[in-house]
Image (cartoon, rainbow, N blue to C red):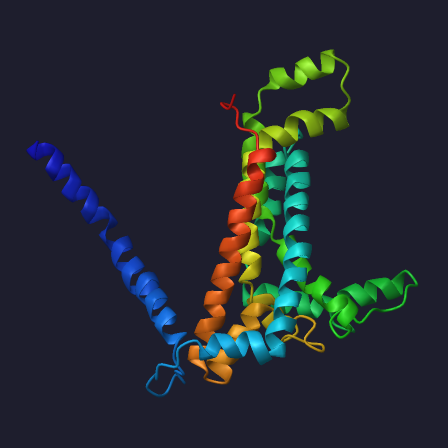
Amino acid sequence: MKSNTKYNYAGYLYILPWIIGFLLLQLVPLINSLWYSFTDFQLLGSPNFTGLANFKKIFSGDQTFIKSLNVTFIYVLIAVPLKIAFALFIAVILNQKIKGINLFRTLYYIPSILGGSVAVSVLWKYLFMNQGVVNNTLAVVGLPAIDWLGDPRYALGTVSMVTVWQFGSSMLLFLAGLKQIPVSLYEAARIDGAGRARIFWKITIPELSPIVLFNLIMQMINAFQDFTSAYVITQGGPLKSTYLYGLMLYDQGFKFFKMGYASALSWILFVIIMFFTSLTFRSSQSWVHYGDSK
């Protein structure tokens, strides 16, 4: 009994740094932001309780909120499905037995190591600027230049591609899942005369569906909170066509010093993310296949 207690204390000691970090850097700020959302906190002054005033203003007269929310929804609808589909496509290719495949796997994972950094966003901006690499390449083949970042029709799609390009983590999970699919399933399907497309949709996709669910939820949460790429590349323009929700939060809190208002916006985003996450979990009952389920 004493031995078990000793091991328990050792375990608590090991996780103590995480507990301290969680309390100081996550839980306390979370509680504070909830309190600030009901105040007129201006960052440099003392907060005064105003009840639901911030939320009433958001839903009744803030057109920027509606615009930012629409842009964010479109961004999520573009970036998340494309990222997951592209990650699965590359994972299937990298699952083949090809000479030097480990090198290719490493190269394809490098963008995710870099992450959503400022450096990547700056690089993307230079690639798609008016005199950037992409337009110069189009000129070489005789095609007209496109204002990728200055035209509202193309700006959001261009920014979304930064997220799609960083598909390495999702690809790695899909690749691990592909390795776990029993070869006997494919052999039986081929004996029955199934083609590649049928095998993919009837075996590969159902077997990978739990990983698809995980990637979908994680990438959706990340996309709703995205900030860096739009801020560095377009600053929300042109005509607020790339004004993501994260940009609005930043502007309200650190540009206009309306920290109470920004806190209210952040809790609305939290509810939105929770709603779509719950909706995804509920829908998964009809399309996610688990190997041990009957």
Position of 291 relative to 59 (above/below): above
Work out which residue is located at the far top of the displayed protein and give it: 191
Task: Work out whether residue 169 can be spotted.
Answer: no
- The quarter of the image holding the N terminus is top left
Quadrant hosting residue 165: bottom right
x then y, percent, for residue 52: 43, 76
The answer to whether one can see residue 27 in this image is: yes
Residue 136 percent location from the top left of the image: 82, 67
Left or right: 52 with respect to 159? left
Task: Relative to 93, say whether 253 is above or below.
Answer: below
Residue at 55% in and 52% down: 276
Q: Which sits in the foreground, 101 or 247?
A: 247
Q: Residue at x 68, y 76 (%)?
A: 240
Q: Residue furthest bottom?
A: 45
- Outermost residue toward the left in this view: 2
| Lateral position of residue 48 relative to residue 229, left or right | left
Where is residue 230, by image quadrant? bottom right
**253 or 157: nearer the eye?**
253
Q: Quadrant of residue 184?
A: top right
Q: How many marks?
A: 0
Pick whichever, 125 or 17, lies toward us. Answer: 17
> Which of the two residues, 55 or 140, is positioned nearer the viewer here?
55
Residue positioned most to the right: 142
Give the percent coordinates (x, y) of residue 260: 42, 78
